[in-house]
Amino acid sequence: MHPRLARLILPTVLLGLTASACAASGIPADSTSEKRSWSQITDAAKGQTVDLWMYGGDQQGNAYVDDVLTPAAAELGVTLRRVPVADTKDAMTRILAERRAGSTDGAVDLVWVNGDNFATGKQVDAWRCGWSSQLPNMKFVAPDDALVTQDFGTEVDGCEAPWHKAQFTLVYDSARVAKPPTSMSSVLRWAQDHPGRFTYPAPPDFTGSVFVREVLYSTSGGYGQIPAQFDQGAYDKLTPKLWGALKDVAPSLWRQGRTYPRDSVALDRLYADGEVDMTMTYGPATLTKLVADGTFPATTRVLPLDEGTIGNASFLAIPSSAGDPEGAMVVANLALSPEQQAIKADPGTWGQFTVLDIDLLSQSDRARFDALPASDVVPPLDVLSRDANPELASSWVPRLDEGWRRAVLGSGS
Amino acid sequence: MTQHPTSSPRSRGDRRATRQLGGARLVAPAVLLILAVTGTALGAVVATSLGLLPLVGQPRLNIDGFTTLAGDLRAATQESLLTATTATLLAAAIGLAIATVVVRAGGGVRLVIGLTVAVMTVPHLVGAAGTGLLLSDVGLAQRWSGISAASWPELVGGRWPWATVLELAWKESAFVALVVFASVGRHYADLREVAAVLGAAPRAQWRRVLLPLAAPALASSSLIVFVYSLGTYEVARLLGRAYPEPLPVMAYRLFTDIDVAARPQAAATAVVATGLALLAAVMALPLLRRLGADR
Amino acid sequence: MRWRTAHQPRLTVIRALLVFWLVVPLTPLVLWAGASRWSGTVRLPQDFGFRGWQEALDAGVIAALVRSGLLGVAVALIATPLGVMAGRALGWRLLRRPALPSVVLLAPVVLAPFAVAMGLDVVILRLGIPGEIAVVLVLSVFALPYTTFTMRATYLGLDPDLEEQARVLGASARQARRRVTLPAATTGLATATGLAFLVGWSDYAVTLLIGGGQIVTAPMLIGSAAAGSGNDALSSTLAISASLPPLVALAVFTYAASRRRTAAHS
């Protein structure tokens, strides 16, 4: 009797557990605008502990948050805890699970996201919205700044607060590259003339993905030729040239294009070891330290392109399941303050470009930015982002990634 | 409880029945905990692969998760099986060699034991990083060996998953060695004395005494290594090529895809990997029982 | 003895090869941990120093190691006793139909962390189980195959009749187990406990996704360091820091065991 009863109880318990997980969460995301005043929010935030989930592979970023942002938040009564993740996608998995379970006291209060992850969260209403436009420090952000009002083509809608600006940058070793190419098509030509000395990370890696989009801009004759939102007709018209260009260059790539580095870290290692002569990054702020500590050769330089490169902004978002949203808003506002943005932009501290509009700042704040030391490797943002191209909508990204895997990598049913 | 020293058939049968009920009670806590946890996880994964637990939209029973990527699934399965089989064979052979050396208890054995345990404490992620630094085209091995970088074989991310297999075999050989040593341990010393007294040469001692003694532990630990290698993610991700990728790497890539509609495909990949491993376990169990029973 | 001395050279060579096999993949990490600058493709670092150790301290490695240790102990406390009981039942063939329980006991190895992330995290959140407890339970489940099958192999080498003879001679069931069987299974027990501890010590995926970031363990630090460029010194130092405590524990255990053995002999 005993084991037979157990054999009946167990499946029932399992079914019940799975059923409880089955019912999709019916709790709608908080999409109403934040109605409280800022002083009410700061009062509610006092004593809260904010868990900031952010990419932990950048030691300078970790040091900035631990040594500068956390004490500053403590002065406002908020305890900031940094949770390191190897990839923001790990944070997204947690947020999506909390959303599906309908948690209201989630473990993720604030997360550093870019357009891809923001769009994923938007698909399932995972973000708390209507709060970032109320932040006092948002007045220093240009209201018409396209990089800040839209995140990869998705309307921000007050669902995330801007934090840094970034520019896709090609990097080369001036000691090994005699005549650096000046446009994307000449980069591909250079790769063909120097077999085995160039490669790029395989999409869906973030950096490899934006490289493919850069090549698409180049083969399509500029970003103006491509509709910002995904359009199947445009895809069918424009991508054959893209895949053709990438397939033509493939035999001249590293390992004859049989395989590609799995992510930008792997490509950086190839570059640092001298196996390839160029690398690329979507976060040029890290270049200063990489050259300073000897990881990259001292002759590393940034490769500007005639047609400009893609630029974007990264944000701090609050999940709808966050347990300490007021504290998170206070931290996001603090991170947006001119003082913090100036400290963060110092190449010796972190080197991340500011999202603030210098013209909107007060005299003393402007002086803070003017006093910033220059980096040996990375030009200032206004130079780097000359002719900056906007990003395509995030609806393009998975299609292009999948198309690359099929056309160039050779995967597919 | 008093025991009758007589061994009438009925009391022997009673003892066996009591022992077997006691056996069920011994096994129950572990089995129940595992069933609760893995049963729920498996149920959720299978349901997701069949479209019943979508993140967006209504649940709809379908097998799109499996069919959309059938070709990729096949390639990934081949890659996983190749890696797991080779890694298991290598790990078993070297693990047995380590256990033999340790059990012989000569000089320098403490060093081997210490190193084996050290290897076990190193997480696979770190072992993979070290192996990558060692075996890449301009890795430490190439720099120290004097072979030019151009003629160095493609061990990392090459056509054959050499680096992945070597890293898995390296760490798992330590695991096999420890498990075999733990089960053989003391007994070997005594049995070896007996064999030596009876005039057996060392190699015969190894083949006739150590090998049968170690066989059950070797078999069960090899099965665990095979099944673990089917499901390992970090190593193949760091050291393998971009395509085809083993099942866990493919599952993770699809699971963290920007498009949440790729979740069923990720779950389908996980189901295939799990099914493979279960199949291997089920096929190997009779062999395990026979090895155990031979003693 | 005659055959022992004749065997020595071959055994030494094999031993040297095995030492080489065990050590070689760790060499780049050891070198990086002592390097403050290693550019390009030179054979050795240009500068030796403690840069990696300073960076590791800044990253909070000591607190992370403590948390890893507590997690490992918690997992061992659950997985070892359950594994001993199950291993005893399997190894001494106390089950009429051992096939099904054996498959179940092997199932957690089959599943692997990525499947856990896909299904369990939502359920655990729904049931309101605190993250820390959920992590320990799930990791214990992952450790159970190792403890069970280690103890199964151990019990296969133990004679069940010895315990029964002790019972015949008047010992209670518990006394017989404690005085007769368990002492003979010490090595196996130590291995099983060690394996369970290591499962908790070196886990990454479950701690991250189910623990909800409350538990920042050493593997989480290693994982995020390895995800960035130019962190070789840091990750190597973290790796070595994460490997030392279990080694120290083993050294202490071995020393204590040998002391006990000499005390017993004298």
Image (spheres, helix red, strand yellow):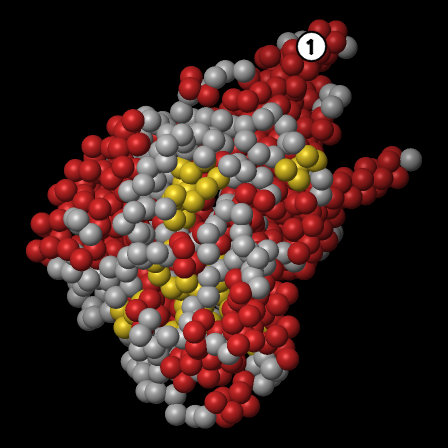
Which one is nearer the viewer's eye here, B172 or A5? B172
Q: Is residue A35 left or right of residue B28?
A: left
Which one is nearer the viewer's eye here, A219 or B79? A219
Image quadrant in which you'd find residue A81: bottom right
Which image quadrant: the C terminus of chain C? top right
Q: Is residue A264 left or right of residue A48?
A: left
Residue C113's x, y, as percent? 44, 53
The chain letter for the residue carrying disc 1 is C
Q: Is residue C34 above or below residue A224?
A: above
Image quadrant in which you'd find residue C48: top right
Residue C73's x, y, as percent? 65, 56
Q: Secondary structure at mark 1?
A: helix
Residue drawn at x 65%, y 14% is C13
Residue drawn at x 32%, y 80% is A29
Q: Is residue A161 visible?
A: yes
Q: Is residue B225 above or below residue B95?
A: below
Residue A232's x, y, as percent? 11, 57
Q: Tag count in the figure?
A: 1
Q: Is residue A382 left or right of residue C68?
A: left
Amino acid, disc 1: Pro
Residue drawn at x 16%, y 60% is A227
Residue C220's x, y, as percent? 55, 55
Residue drawn at x 43%, y 26% is B155
- Residue for badge 1: C9
Q: Is residue A214 above or below residue A390?
A: above
Which one is nearer the viewer's eye here, B179 or A30? A30
